[in-house]
Amino acid sequence: MFSLFRRTPSGHPLVRQDDPGTFRVRVRTRGHGEVVEFRFTKAAHIGADDGGGYLFRKPVISPGHFDRGELVVRFDSRYRVTGTETEGVDFIPVAEWKD
């Protein structure tokens, strides 16, 4: 019951921070509703953005039906999530994840 009010460590309802350098998101494709999860790290997957922050951009191709999309997660200079964008997919809020 109280998990409804618990915030994710990253401070953003769509991005879960597993540890100080690792983040996780889940998206649902608009075509067939397939769930695809992405795990990404500061060291290997997040790049510098022109505005002084950081950016994770990833094309999405679902494994079952090959639905296509793209997701973007923007961070400030301290790796706090400042925004999310999608095309062809929808983020699944962390509160709705069933691990």
Image (spheres, rainbow, N blue to C red):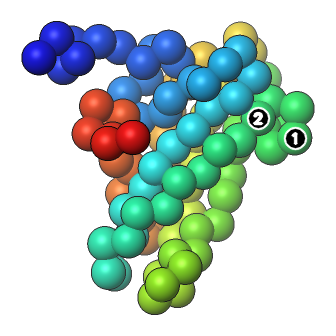
Q: Say which amino acid is labelled 1.
A: Ala
Apparent side of residue 61 relative to residue 8 in the rendered image (left or right): right
Q: Quadrant of the image for the C terminus?
A: top left
Residue 10 against residue 70 in the figure, above or below: above
Apparent side of residue 3 relative to residue 98 in the rendered image (left or right): left
Apparent side of residue 61 relative to residue 26 in the rendered image (left or right): right
Residue 53 can be seen in this image: no
The residue under the point 26% across, 39% down is 96
Marks 2 & 1, CB-CB < 8 Å contact: yes
Q: CA distance from mark 2 to mark 1?
A: 6 Å
Residue, disc 2:
41
List x then y, in percent, for residue 44. 87, 41
Going by the picture, which residue comes out furthest to the left?
Answer: 1
Apparent side of residue 4 relative to residue 72 in the rendered image (left or right): left
**Count of labels shown?**
2
Helix, strand or loop at mark 2:
strand
Residue 38 against residue 75 in the figure, above or below: below
Residue 51 in which image quadrant: top right
List x then y, in percent, for residue 35. 41, 63
The residue under the point 57% across, 38% down is 24
Front in this rendered view, residue 24 or 49:
24
Give the numbered dot on residue 44. 1
List x then y, in percent, for residue 67. 47, 82
Residue 21 in which image quadrant: top right
Give the numbered dot on residue 24. none
Q: Say which amino acid is labelled 2.
A: Thr
Helix, strand or loop at mark 1:
loop
Residue 56 against residue 81 in the figure, above or below: below
